[in-house]
Amino acid sequence: MRQPIMYISIISLVLLAACSFLASANGTTVSQEVKEYSEYDLDMKSEILEFEEYHITIHYPETPNTQINQTIIDYVNQIKSKFKQESYQAMQVMKSHSSHELHVDFEVLHESEQYFVIHFDETMDVGYPDISKSRTIMNFKKENGQRLETEDLFNQEVDYLQALADLTNEKLEEEFGKEINQNSFLEKATAPLPSNYQNVAINSGGVTIFFRDGVQPEEISLKMDNINEFLHPEITVVENEALHEATPSIEGLKSININGEDVKRPHGENKKIALTFDDGPHPQKTLDILEVLERYDAKGTFFMLGKRVSYYPETAQEVVTEGHEIGNHTWNHPCLTRLSKDEVVRQIQATKEIIQHVTGEETTRVRLPFGENLSAPYYGTMEIVPWDVSVETWRKENPRQIADTFISEINDGDIVLLHDLEGSTPEVLDMILASLSYEGYEFVTLSQLEEK
Ligand code: ZN
């Protein structure tokens, strides 16, 4: 499992220290009896698309189980087409030209020997005053990759919806007092209807019910003792068998201060350009890019997404080890224009913190998602880095054509935008560096470009 690796290892270090202390205190060896599960080695996939009419960012996990992956891909495709349809309709109604956005991120809620549970957070902004937010919970059986919807979790022979409604209301009262059940909004949201209980997640000690968006509290957990009799006979939730509950999220990281400097950028005299790579790290593409850079003795700056750094800490570390710089590209690539000030600050700070935690480097530069450069709301003091020329590998032209177009546009002192996630970047980069080295260009980090 990639994401929680460092957090788990910190905990195990503490445990190991405690064990060795105990062992020496007793004068005996403590044999650890840790149950071994085959935990998923997750990959984090990110699709980032920038068109004039809309922006799409979708992050989703890829597991070793192809059936699970197929269900997730189907979901991703479905939500994309739903968004495009709504975006098109809104455009007809509003005749507005503001750019629409689809943003989907995920969290692993629970993983045990039997189950794998993901939470997808969906935001759709098609220009209406209310931005639509929703969630999708997916419980999977690891054994066969089958998705378990609410009706698969519960015994069809009992009125499980009524049971869920009763238990939910009881729990709400227990946690928030009697007054909570006089809230008519909440009463509607907990009524025994299938639509109210679409998002039920298996957890280590029972289930968590997520209410529809806008309801407070957002979720409530029911213990195994209470729900056991209503569960489908094949569903077994063993207390405390979870491998982990939730992966590090932006909220989980403690805040730190941003201490950046505002640095002016003079154009260099010795034919220098600064290559920048956005949206990574990627476990393969970033390494391919590093290899090309090394061949031309080129240095670059990588604007990373905090969440991807938490999945691929080794790749982020490798970038630093090879002498390149790391910049901040937010936690999960939202359009900052729709976020509150607090959310924007958290996006930047959490990313800054994870980069520092993983690589020891303090980032002093930020690149805001979707070219919202100087106009986007940004409340920190880090240097916002725009770009002069972008290498448009997302255009499906052939690499030679993309490289040639770019080479004809480049000037001394330019900042160049490339993307780690995109397929042809290493190939195009190789062609560009071959031509420009020949013309006497040097490829430097942003710090080096700013020197002198
Ligand atoms: Zn980006």
Image: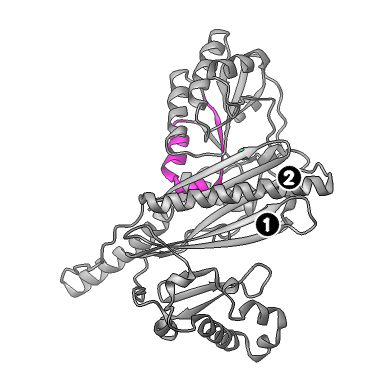
The segment highlighted magenta reads 299-323
Q: Is residue 18 above or below residue 264?
A: below
* Label drawn at residue 88: 2
* Label drawn at residue 12: none
Relative image position of residue 53 (x, y in whole percent):
73, 39
Q: Is residue 247 above or below residue 210?
A: above
Relative image position of residue 330 (x, y in whole percent):
61, 47
Question: At label 2, which amino acid type do we have?
Answer: Tyr
For residue 13, side relative to residue 129 (left or right) = left
- Location of ligand 1 given as a quarter of the image: top right
Dot 2 falls on a residue whose secondary structure is helix
For residue 78, side relative to residue 90 (left or right) = left
Relative image position of residue 442 (x, y in whole percent):
56, 17
Residue labelled with disc 1: 343
For the C terminus, the quadrant is: top right
Residue occupying image coordinates x 57% and y 17%: 403
- Kindly tell me whether residue 227 is visible in this rendering: yes
Q: Give residue 193's quadrant in the image.
A: bottom right
Q: Nearer the viewer, residue 331 or 397?
A: 397
Residue 305 is covered by the magenta coloring: yes
Q: How many C-alpha atoms fall within 10 Å of the one at disc 1: few (<14), some, or many (≥20)? A: some
Q: Nearer the viewer, residue 78 or 353?
A: 78
Residue occupying image coordinates x 22% and y 69%: 33
The numbered mark, 2 or 1, whose residue comes first in the sequence reads 2
Camera-near label (2 vs 1) is 2
Q: Is residue 2 above or below residue 295?
A: below
**What secondary structure is the magenta-colored segment mainly?**
helix
Q: Give residue 315's quadrant in the image.
A: top left
Dot 1 falls on a residue whose secondary structure is helix
Question: At label 1, which amino acid type do we have?
Answer: Glu
Q: How many marks?
A: 2
